Amino acid sequence: MNADIRISVGFPNHPKTVKLDRRLGFQGIRSLRALWTWAAQNRPDGNLGGANVVSGVRSNEGSTAAQRREPDVGSTRAPFVGA
């Protein structure tokens, strides 16, 4: 399990970040950060296949390591990916 993630200092001004902020506001940026931290803890290889990431991120927010669980298998749909 990863202990941290790295974010480029250029992240706030990247065109995709600006577009995400325009479309979804701060909640969109917060959700992306939650996805990254969830993936670092639960899928360190970066393979999100077979995971219901949205459900997994929401269920793991604020939980301790002992309470975390693998997300439900199902849809990997994320409305902002590739937009």
Image (cartoon, grey):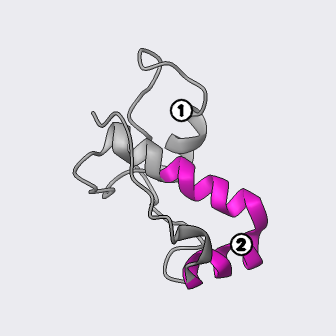
Spatial CA distance of label 2 from label 1 is 23 Å
Q: Earlier in the sequence, mark 2 or mark 1?
A: 2
Q: Which residue is drawn at 38% across and 34% down?
A: 70
Q: Is residue 83 visible?
A: yes
For disc 1, the marked residue is 60
Q: Which residue lies furthest to the front in this view?
A: 9
Q: What stretch is highlighted in magenta?
A: 15-35
Q: Residue at x 73, y 57 (%)?
A: 27
Q: Can residue 52 be seen in this view?
A: no
Q: Is residue 18 left or right of residue 78?
A: right
Q: Where is residue 68 in the image (x, y as percent from the top left)?
A: 44, 25
Dominant secondary structure (helix, strand or loop) of the stretch shown in magenta? helix
**Vertical order, 62 against 82 (above or below):** above
Q: Where is residue 53 in the image (x, y as percent from the top left)?
A: 47, 51
Q: Where is residue 61 in the image (x, y as percent from the top left)?
A: 59, 33
Q: Does the magenta stretch include residue 28?
A: yes
Residue 21 badge: 2
Q: Which residue is drawn at 50% across and 52% down?
A: 35
Q: To which quarter of the image does residue 1 belong?
A: top left
Point out the image quarter for the C terminus.
Answer: bottom right
Q: Where is residue 6 in the image (x, y as percent from the top left)?
A: 39, 53
